Amino acid sequence: MPAELLQFLDRRIPRYTSYPTAVQFLADVDGSTYTEWLAALPAHVPVSVYLHVPFCSELCFYCGCHTTVARNYTPVAAYVDLLEREIVLVGRYLGDRRRVVHVHWGGGTPTMLQPRDFARLTAALRRTFTFATDCEIAIEIDPRTLTRDVVFALKEGGVTRASLGVQDFDPRVQKAVGRLQSFEQTARTADWLREVGIVHINLDLMYGLIYQTIETVAETARRSLALNPDRIALFGYAHVPWMKRHQKLMPEEALPGALERFAQSRAATIVLKQAGFRPIGLDHFAKPDDLLARRQRQKGLHRNFQGYTTDEAAVLIGFGTSAIGVLPQGYAQNASSTVAYGNAIKGGRMATVRGRALTEDDRLRRDIIEQLMCNLEVDLAVTAARRNRSLNDFTAELSEIEALARRGLVYRSGGTITIPEDARPLVRTICAVFDAYLSNQETRYSRAV
Ligand SMILES: C[S@@+](CC[C@H](N)C(=O)[O-])C[C@H]1O[C@@H](n2cnc3c(N)ncnc32)[C@H](O)[C@@H]1O
C-alpha cells in the first residue's frame, strides 16, 4: 500500500451499519412516532428482533458497546422485568403476532442472564411473535463467564448460532486490555455449545489494540482455526475515548498507527484466506459453504447493527437500552441509560429518545452504501432508477469516484462502481462518497482501517 494512501486509512469514517448513521439521529423521533410506525406495519411483513443486555461481569478496556459492570445479579434481574414489559408493550402496538425470522441477543453479555430469566424472556417473545420454523437465534457469548447451565438454557431457548468474544489470544495483549481469557476457556465453550447441538460458531477477533503486532494478530487467526468456526469477525479497534472514557485506561501511545493496523488486518486476512475462508465485506470471514458466503455469492447479503447478516427482514424491532428499531419509515432508538429506559417502560411508555425518519434521498443512498459494503459493487444507474433518479443526480459523487479510480481504489464502468479486492479495507472510504451527512462529522468516528 503506497504511503500516499495513508490519508485514506487515517480518515475517520462510519462503519455504515445503518444510513443515516446513529450520529444523525434526532430527538424528534420519540415514543409516539415509534408507536405510529409500529401500528402502521402491514401484518404480513416478517420482522427480526434484537434484545440488548447491557451488563458484563468485568470491563474490557477497549469496549465500545453500551454496557456496564454488574457486580451482582440485582440490576440484571430488574432489567429482565423491564425487557419483559417492553415486549408486551410493543406487542400491544403491533397487534397481530408477527412472523419472526431472526433473533439476536446482544450486549454487553446476554449470557449473564440466569437460565430462568433467559427462558422467561424467550417465552415472552414466543407469546408476542410467531417464530419461523427456520428462525435463526443468535447470541453473543463471553467464554470466560459462561456456565453449562446457561448453555442448556440456550439450547432450550432455541439458540442456533453463537458468537464467542476472543479478540486476541496473546496474554500480553489480553492483560493490557483487561481481558484474560485462555485458549482452553474458548475451546471449552465451543465444545459445550456443540455438545448440545448449537453448531454454528462465530469468533470475534480484533486488530489495532495496544501491544498487538502483525504476529500476535496472525497467530490469533491461526489458533482460531483450530476451533473450527464457521465465521470470524475481525473488527478494527474503534478508539473513541471521547465517548468511552474507560478506553483511556490503555496508553494511547501504545496503539498501533494506521499503517500498522492495515498490516495487522492484512496478515490475519492472509491466514484466514489460506485456510479457505472467504472474506465478507469489510471485516467478516466465512467458510465457503456457510450461508453468509453463499449469500455473498448470490449478492444477497445485508448489513445491520451487528455487522453482516443473511437476515432478509427489512424490519427490526429492538428491545432494551440503546436498542435501535428499523421500520419502513425510519430508525428509532431507545434511551441508553437504564434509568431513563426503566422510567419509560415502568410508566407504560416506549423508551424511544431519538431516531431518524428517512427521506427518499436517504433510502437511495442507504441502498447504494449497503450494496458497496456487502458486494463491493453497485450498479448506480439501476439502483438510482429504482427510485426514479439517474446518474445525473450524482455528478459530484461520480467526480470523486473518478479521483479515487485514478488511484486504483475503485473501477467505474458506465453506471457500475466496483471496489477491487486489494482496496477492500477502504470500502468505507468509497461509501463515504455517497454519504450526504459526512462533512464536518468525521471527528466523531473511528479510523477507516
Ligand atoms: C457487543 S461485544 C459482546 C462481547 C461479549 N460481551 C464478550 O465479552 O465476549 C461484541 C464484540 O464487539 C467487538 N468490540 C467491542 N468493542 C469494540 C471496539 N471498541 N472496536 C471494535 N470492536 C469492538 C468485540 O470483538 C466484541 O467481541
Image (spheres, rainbow, N blue to C red):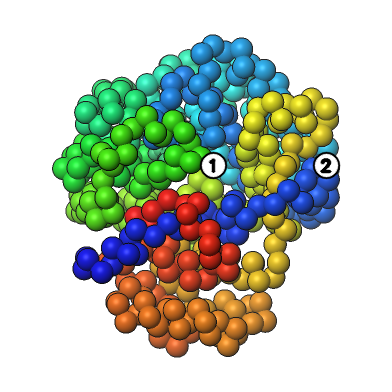
Which of the 4 image quarters holds residue 394? bottom right
Mark-to-mark CA distance, 1 and 2: 24 Å
Which of the 4 image quarters holds residue 337? top right
Q: For this view, does 172 lie left or right of residue 288?
A: left
Question: Which residue is denoted by mark 2 in the rendering?
Answer: 93
Q: For this view, does 79 lie left or right of residue 239?
A: right
In the rendered view, would you say 113 is above or below 130? Answer: above
Question: Which residue is denoted by mark 1 in the rendering?
Answer: 136
Residue 380 visible to the viewer: yes
User: What residue is shown at x 25% (from left), y 39% (from top)?
Assistant: 254
**Circle 1 Cα neighbour tier, 10 Å, few/some/many (<14 / 14–19 / ≥20):** many
Placement of the N terminus among the 4 image quadrants: bottom left
Mark 1 vs mark 2, foreground winner is: 2
| Farthest residue, direction left | 215
**Does mark 1's beta carbon lie closer than 8 Å to ligand 1?**
no
| Along the viewing direction, whichever of 21 and 192 lies nearer the viewer | 21
**Mark closest to the chain's N terminus, 1 or 2:** 2
User: What residue is shown at x 44% (from left), y 79% (from top)?
Assistant: 400
Quadrant containing ligand 1 reads top left
